[in-house]
Image (cartoon, grey):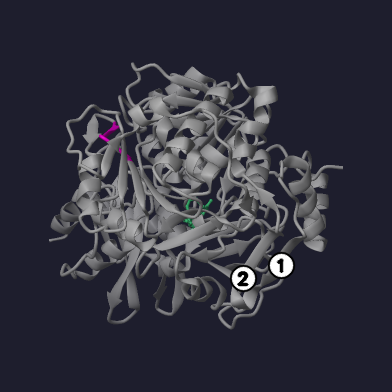
Amino acid sequence: MSYYKIDNLEQYFKHYNKSIREPRKFWGKIASENFTWYQEWEKVMEFDMAEAKIKWFIDAKVNIVKNCIDRHLARRGTKTAIIFEPNDPNEEALHISYNELHERVSKMANVLREQGIQKGDRVCIYLPMIPELAVSVLACARIGAIHSVVFAGFSSSAVATRINDSECKMVITSDGGYRGNKTIDLKGIVDEALEKCPCVEQVLVVKRTNTAIKMMEGRDQWLQPLLDDASDNNVAEIMDAEDPLFILYTSGSTGKPKGMVHTTAGYMVYSAYTFKNVFNYEENDIFWCTADIGWITGHSYILYGPLLNGATTIIFEGVPSYPDFSRFWEIIEKHKVTQFYTAPTAIRALAKENLEFVQKYPLASLKVIGSVGEPINEEAWHWYNDHVGGKRCPVVDTWWQTETGGIMISPIPFVTPTKPTYASLPLPGIQPVLMDEKRNEIEGNQVTGSLCIKFPWPGIARTIWGDHKRYKETYFSTFPGKYFTGDGALRDEVGYYRITGRIDDVVIVSGHNLGTAPIEDAINEHPAVAESAIVGFPHDIKGNALYGFVILKESGEYRDRENLSKEINQHVSDHIGPIAKLDKIQFVTGLPKTRSGKIMRRILRKIAEGDYSNFGDISTLLNPEIVEEIKKGKL
Ligand code: WT7
């Protein structure tokens, strides 16, 4: 019997129970049967939660890229590995076969070695969503260099901080990047960043936009001539199971970004296993995850998870609104996408637009549709289910984090019955627990608490680069012996989990803990509302009161704002209770968001408090200009 694939609910429970009773046997069997190893492990795992030390597949030797590419060549050499869909719909899409990918990655790996990059060196990759990004990532992994992909929307200071923290020797970037009708000057941003980065010796530059750029003698080189001269014969590095594979920065609520370190074998097994099951992946599927490779979602579900399974994965360079709001749907139709994976913020943005944009396309190829990144509110869930999934594609609401390496709680399509706004059940190997304020585990169902995981899984990040103490303190000290996620969750009467959001998104009003997410859900159910964000602000009597920032639907009829405010509060009162009524409502045209779609509540809190003194760093916002607008609207 294989544990790699779950076919029905009975099997899910069987696998789940096995994974809890005998985790070593469970993961050992999956690892042994589905990957190629130079050498298998001595022990499947060892851990010490108190010291935050976790190891999987001890002493095993492996190369993840051999597993992503080389081992597929015999059977799938001519199969498309990557479909590149350019920003401009009139530019032809590119189909890169496994054979071609092998050749490109081998050449790139040789270029890196020739430029002096060795196993263990850190390489910063700052590229737009083009094939060279995938090739660079895989080439690093092939020679054992640790990739640190920085999302190509971050500012020069954010790039510099990340480069310096992990002391990258090299940066791979491009002359520019296309995003909708804009061209971004990536090389200029790198040049500015590198003024503060003495550790960087070399910059390789991909030509994409033909923008005129400055090349610094002795430091910068165009990549293409180096590739032209490189051999396509490359011997992959033999990696230890626990050798770092990559660093990926995630911003904490306080302090500098955390360089999460993922290691080789555990991450490989976990990203592949979760991809296979959560997306019901089958051989001829065309998988599309709309995230950027600069986020963990892109690492695990554009690159590693799909390629480890020999799948066809789409890399999309553009944005959902260019040339118009039907771009996503047009791409699904064009490439006959079978699985589509996106974020609630994109769903809400598209749901705000005219329905015709999506209705123009039958989307009949779709089989599974997924959501990730934040709680998906009920209205967005239904819109997605009805208009994208045509009510026949299971919606997989996948909960996980940069730190977890792969999906942790999610329905398994065609196996787990879905329930709107619920991520539902843990995947095999994952043991969630809810904790109360006294640090006790809350037993039973229909309860809420702080979400922890009480046993290691293969994909967990092993440390924070250069700061194991911070790793231990952040994740393993709040609830000793357990991994603390920072999220709150509710467990319903059948044991399904609903993630209610970050614990720090809780506002205490008159002594009641109010999660902002359910209040936002209630507001969003009002037919005129597109999106909302709630924050607390100091109140003489209640301690805190609630302040709501509300975006109205474009198509929504114009209404008397005062009446609308009353109606919104009536909704809140009906759904949550009068305690959750908002003291202030401000209508806005946008919300300050990070590039990964998270609302920057820190800024909204300051505006609500009337404190305009220092918003901190807003350079990582997707839409920094909105801050001024909201500020003005308040005055
Ligand atoms: C945080 C992790 C993991 C990929 C992208 C985000 C929130 C993520 C869900 C979901 C409710 C979710 C959590 C989590 N989150 N997925 N399906 N339902 N909340 O990675 O930037 O590391 O953020 O995103 O709050 O802790 P990330």
The Cα–Cα distance between marks 2 and 1, rounded to whole angstroms, is: 8 Å
Report whether residue 560 is seen: no
Disc 2 secondary structure class: strand
Left or right, residue 33 beside residue 430? right
Residue 280, x across and y down, in percent: 67, 35
Task: State the residue at coordinates (69%, 63%).
Answer: 431
Query: What's the amino acid at mark 1?
Result: Glu
Q: Is residue 178 magenta?
A: yes
Residue occupied by mark 2: 53
Residue 602, x across and y down, in percent: 31, 65
Task: State the residue at coordinates (40%, 29%).
Answer: 227
Report whether residue 126 is seen: yes
Task: State the residue at coordinates (19%, 50%).
Answer: 192
Q: Quadrant of the C terminus?
A: bottom left
Query: What's the amino acid at mark 2?
Result: Lys
Residue 46 circle label: 1
Disc 1 secondary structure class: strand
Left or right, residue 622 beside residue 395? left
**In-front residue for pair 28/432:** 28
Please tell me which of labels 2 and 1 falls first in the chain.
Answer: 1
Residue 89, x across and y down, in percent: 35, 20
Q: Is residue 116 magenta?
A: no
Quarter occupied by residue 542: bottom left
The range drawn in magenta is 173-179
Tell me if residue 112 comes above or below residue 310 in the rendering: below
Asked if the residues shown at circle 2 and circle 1 are in contact, with their CB atoms under 8 angstroms apart, the answer is yes
Q: Quadrant of the N terminus?
A: top right
Residue 398 circle label: none
